[in-house]
């Protein structure tokens, strides 16, 4: 069942950049991954959904209610972890979370205390609750960011690039945490990291240049691309030549050797090896298609 309905959202900034260009998207319960390179417009979309900025045109409805018209009401119902949740006061985690809970309208002291304690436990911060948030590691900060986003048990949660800058261990821990909160609510996770979506999201979309260029279930999208991805190990010096002849969607150094991935309906030459696409190939194919619009990419 669709809960979040986004229709034809458009936004240009004063410098003329069109950050959102007709975004239409329906989102149901669960974790939705919004994947795109830097500058794609992800944060612009997240801020609009969080009612922190108005679009030039378009509509957003959550459970039938007009989000942009009823922004105050919406703010109490949504949890938001911004990309640059950066400035931390010299306040302990528990005091800051309690303060944010007051701002969120949790007036009953006992209920508030219960919820703050439970969120600190859920995010594995209870042991360090008396430490200043300013002394937290990146991973701890992001977990704190989730704790504050969950205050008031919101039905719509927006997390913008939460894993950028985390080390692999912290990222795994953060993935575990995110995977717990997805049931029975809408969670939108924006990221430029394919693994985030691969690990966590049942539904996804790819955004580039303010537009949605691909949408679906990760497993369907990889399956659809099967038979169209070809790999070869080449000399670095030959890359430019390959790129001019073939649709090179991505390159990767594996054990010091340069692997190139090519998009083609049929085997481009016998030296190429067919590979079953991963979500990474889906992502790079869609970006390749968007950048070469004269080319029909069959996604
Ligand atoms: N406040 C702003 N003023 C002007 N341009 C902006 C502003 N915020 C974002 N942009 C531009 O809009 C485009 C989309 O940015 P953003 O939404 O931050 O993308 P992403 O989060 O995917 O990296 C970029 O070209 C960016 O430079
Ligand atoms: Mg961003």
Image (spheres, rainbow, N blue to C red):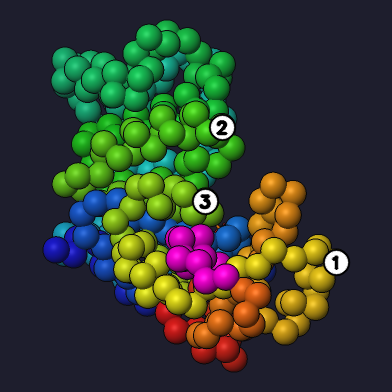
Label count reads 3
Based on the picture, tell me whether residue 276 belongs to the magenta stretch: yes
Q: Residue at x 22, y 28 (%)?
A: 106
Q: Nearer the viewer, mark 1 or mark 3?
A: 1
Q: Position of residue 234 (x, y in %)?
A: 75, 66
User: Which label belongs to residue 167?
Assistant: 2
**Assess mark 3: CB under 8 A from ligand 2?**
no
Q: Residue at x 27, y 68 (%)?
A: 26
Q: CA distance from mark 3 to mark 2?
A: 13 Å
Q: Residue at x 23, y 34 (%)?
A: 152
User: Which label belongs to residue 193?
Assistant: 3
For label 1, the SS is: helix
Q: Is residue 10 above or below residue 29?
A: below
Tag 3 near tag 2, CB within 8 Å: no
72 lies left or right of 271: left
Q: Is residue 236 above or below residue 225?
A: above
Residue range corresponding to the magenta coloring:
273-284
Q: Residue at x 55, y 67 (%)?
A: 284
- First in residue order: circle 3 vs circle 2: 2
- First in residue order: circle 1 vs circle 2: 2
Q: Residue furthest right?
A: 237
Q: CA distance from mark 1 to mark 2?
A: 32 Å
């Amino acid at each position: 069942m669709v809960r979040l309905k986004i229709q034809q959202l458009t936004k240009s900034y004063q410098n003329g950049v069109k950050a959102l260009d007709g975004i239409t998207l329906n989102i149901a319960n669960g974790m939705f991954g919004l994947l795109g390179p830097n500058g794609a417009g992800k944060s612009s979309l997240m801020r609009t959904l969080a009612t922190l900025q108005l679009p030039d045109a378009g509509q957003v409805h959550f459970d039938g209610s007009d989000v942009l018209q009823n922004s105050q009401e919406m703010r109490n119902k949504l949890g938001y972890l911004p990309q640059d949740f950066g400035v931390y006061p010299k306040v302990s985690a528990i005091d800051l979370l309690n303060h944010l809970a007051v701002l969120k309208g949790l007036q009953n002291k006992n209920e508030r205390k219960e919820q703050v304690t439970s969120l600190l436990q859920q995010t594995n911060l209870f042991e360090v609750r008396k430490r200043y948030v300013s002394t937290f590691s990146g991973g701890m900060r992001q977990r704190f960011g989730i704790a504050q986003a969950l205050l008031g048990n919101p039905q719509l949660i927006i997390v913008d690039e939460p894993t950028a800058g985390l080390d692999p261990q912290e990222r795994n821990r953060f993935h575990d945490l995110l995977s717990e909160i997805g049931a029975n609510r809408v969670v939108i996770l924006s990221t430029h990291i394919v693994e985030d979506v691969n690990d966590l999201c049942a539904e996804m979309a790819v955004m580039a240049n303010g537009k949605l260029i691909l949408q679906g279930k990760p497993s369907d999208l990889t399956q659809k691309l099967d038979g169209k991805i070809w790999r070869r190990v080449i000399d670095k010096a030959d890359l430019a030549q390959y790129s001019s002849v073939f649709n090179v969607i991505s390159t990767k150094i594996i054990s010091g050797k340069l692997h190139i991935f090519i998009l083609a309906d049929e085997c481009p030459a016998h030296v190429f090896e067919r590979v079953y696409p991963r979500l990474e190939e889906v992502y790079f194919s869609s970006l390749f298609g968007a950048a070469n619009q004269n080319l029909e990419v069959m996604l």
